[in-house]
Amino acid sequence: MKFFLDSANLEELKKAAEWGIIDGVTTNPSLIAKEGVPMEEQIRKICDIFDGDISAEVVSDTAEEMVEEGRRLASIHSNVVVKVPLVQEGIKAVSRLSKEGIRTNVTLCFSAAQALLAAKAGAYIVSPFIGRVDDLGWPGMDLIRDIVTIYKNYGFQTQVLSASVRGALHVVEAAKAGAHITTLPYKVIEQLFHHPLTEKGLEQFLADYRKAFDLIPA
Ligand code: G3P
């Protein structure tokens, strides 16, 4: 399962990259807006410090404009994946961009029916937002399971990226459901490391060893 960092913050990206377990980056217009730097400039900065798929989202309204903007974003770096919203104009744009060999991440997916449209349009990635489905009281993980099943049934190559992730359980459940990728806020990645028994066990190991050989704790 690939882990992507869901952030446009350069400091978070630098810290996360040190773990050696991050395979890519996803951004969206809200995450870019938080950094206060225009899209193409911030994506260029991310490409300069990280080597892996980097999703950059179009902010145009029509298919024509999305295609033009997608071409510009893709020209920033070969690692850029053009993020397009799962709306009619977006699917039109994805169909055209995929034929031009430009990789797309179709985002704001909330149903298996929508995910079928993304795959048929030639999307490289589809991003079902499981957290926002959960927020409404529906089982967001069912969405991942349904999409993975449907894509397997027809041999679609589109990768399922579990997005809008709220915690470690979402990561585990998405992995069990067969999602290809999960994109994680920095704080969720940090959560994955922690277990009280690990911390307690290490503390005891070190205390026993240091006591046995009269070593001063670090
Ligand atoms: O990649 C999509 C993600 O950033 C949305 O997350 O928490 O706003 O639903 P959230």
Image (cartoon, helix red, strand yellow):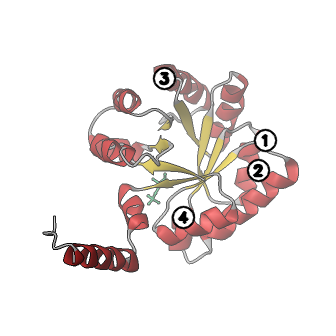
Above or below for 85 versus 171: above
- How packed mark 4 is, by other alpha carbons closer than 10 Å (few <14, some 14-19, many 20 or more), is many
Say left or right for 96 vs 182: right
- Report if the CB atoms under discs 2 and 3 are less than 8 Å apart: no
Crowd rating for badge 2 (residues with CA inside 10 Å; few <14, some 14–19, many 20+)? some
**Cα–Cα span, label 4 and label 2:** 23 Å
At numbered mark 1, what does the secondary structure look like: helix, strand or loop? helix
Image spot of residue 215 (x, y percent): 16, 69
| Residue 176: x %, y % from top left | 66, 66
Q: Nearer the viewer, mark 4 or mark 1?
A: 4
| Badge 3 element | loop
Please report whichever mark, 3 or 1, sits nearer to the chain's N-terminal start. 3
Against 140, residue 66 (above or below) is: above
Q: Amino acid at mark 4?
A: Val
Q: What residue appears at the point 38 percent right and 70 percent down from the top-left corner?
A: 194
**Residue at (16% x, 64% y) in the render:** 218
Pick whichever of labels 2 and 3 is earlier in the sequence: 3
Task: Say which amino acid is labelled 1.
Answer: Lys
Q: Nearer the viewer, mark 4 or mark 3?
A: 4
Residue position for label 4: 171
Which circle marks residue 116 in the picture? 2
Q: Are marks 2 and 1 in contact (CB under 8 Å)?
A: yes
Mark 3 sits on what residue? Answer: 77
Secondary-structure class at tag 2 = helix
Question: Disc 1 marks which residue?
Answer: 120
